[in-house]
Image (cartoon, rainbow, N blue to C red):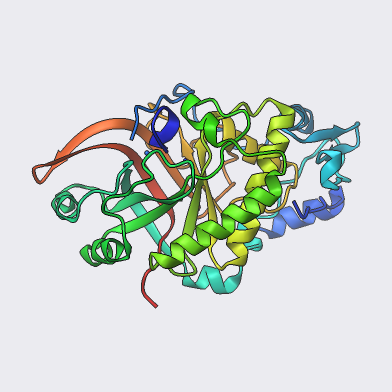
Amino acid sequence: MRSLTSIRPWYLGIVTPPLAVATTLAALLTLSPPASATPVPDVPAVAAAPDASPDAASVASSVASSGLSVDGASGLSANASSGLSSGVGAAVVPDAVPADAVDSPAVLARAVQFKGAAFDTCQAPPLATMKAWRSSSYRAVGVYFGGRGRGCPDQQHLSRSWLASVDGMGWRVLPIFVGSQSPCVRSAAKKKVRMGSRSAAQGRTEGRQAAEAAGKLGIRQGSALYLDMEAYDADNAGCARTTLAFVRAWNREVRGQGFLPGFYSSAASGVRHMEQARRAGQSDLPSVMWFARWGSGSSLYGEPTLHADAWRPHRRIHQYAGNVTETHGGRRLVVDRNTVDAPVARFKP
């Protein structure tokens, strides 16, 4: 988020099937496992994503550096502490089960989808500003509704009535929860809110907090809640394991409370880490992926760290620019720019 720097914002396993079964499943399943400070993106613009998954050797190399381990030449497995294993052959690594396969059909039926331009900013703007910005091309706004890691914890305007009002104006809302951060988070401002060693329990607790905070603001079940995990050293295997345990537990709890768990992070760290976990057959991953890569255009489906078929359809948000000053209707804000094709908050029955 725009919390990429100083003042603000962000396994019950799946056992991979044998190669023959995986090949059959791949033919049948649609692969869709599915911002105030001056943020500094940690990756430059890059070329478009390849159309095919890498071979097993390259996936194994990536997974091994991100908190998962390679199980000899026979295939991939999660770190031993996770209890996951794989029987896939070394020549082919099938894609993981789509995220929407684990989301409740009832929750999916309630979800409200939005496709278009969105902005996020540390402090929820006054209603007069939200009204003035209806003259812009934006039709959705990212709101930092909870979490101990928020850069702007004192939200002067955000309330149940504020959300009802902006919803009445026609705005769609992206609820963002900035909780505990990775032990190897890069932002100095976020080191004070790093998660502890019992990260799974902490993730479960904070997932419950997110659901409760959303409910108090009138955000109904079926909404997507986005976990902001600022850039971290995903190549640190121990740190990656701890972080992934937190994220998976947060996702499980949020799902259990009737919401869709989304995930925001840098494309080069957290998002790459989640994709590696997905390819390794990990469970309890995010339903929606919000990736930050600035200066690369606003494409949703050209992100090189994500397989072309991962987190789709309607499962991606791209934050493609940050710390941008814009004026609309005479009202000025410093925002991040996003392209959205994803579920948003739901307010009405």
Q: Is residue 219 visible?
A: no
Q: Residue at x 77, y 41 (%)?
A: 93
Q: Is residue 158 left or right of residue 238?
A: left
Q: Quadrant of residue 99?
A: bottom right
Percent coordinates x, y for residue 194 in the rendering = 58, 35
Residue 185, x across and y down, in percent = 57, 29
> Residue 14 sits in which quadrant?
bottom right
Q: Quadrant of the N terminus?
A: top left
Q: Is residue 270 left or right of residue 86?
A: left
Q: Is residue 10 above or below residue 294?
A: below
Residue, x 61% and y 69% (percent of image)? Answer: 104
Count of residue discs: 0
Residue 316 position, x and y percent, is 48, 48
Picture quadrant where residue 88 is located: top right
Quadrant position of the C terminus in the picture: bottom left
Q: At which x and y percent is residue 335?
A: 29, 37
Camera-side residue: 307 or 152? 152
Q: Residue at x 71, y 55 (%)?
A: 27
Question: In this view, which residue lies farthest toward the bottom?
Answer: 349
The foreground one among 298 and 11 is 11
Figure check: 329 above or below 185: below
User: Is residue 137 among the parts visible in the rendering?
Assistant: yes
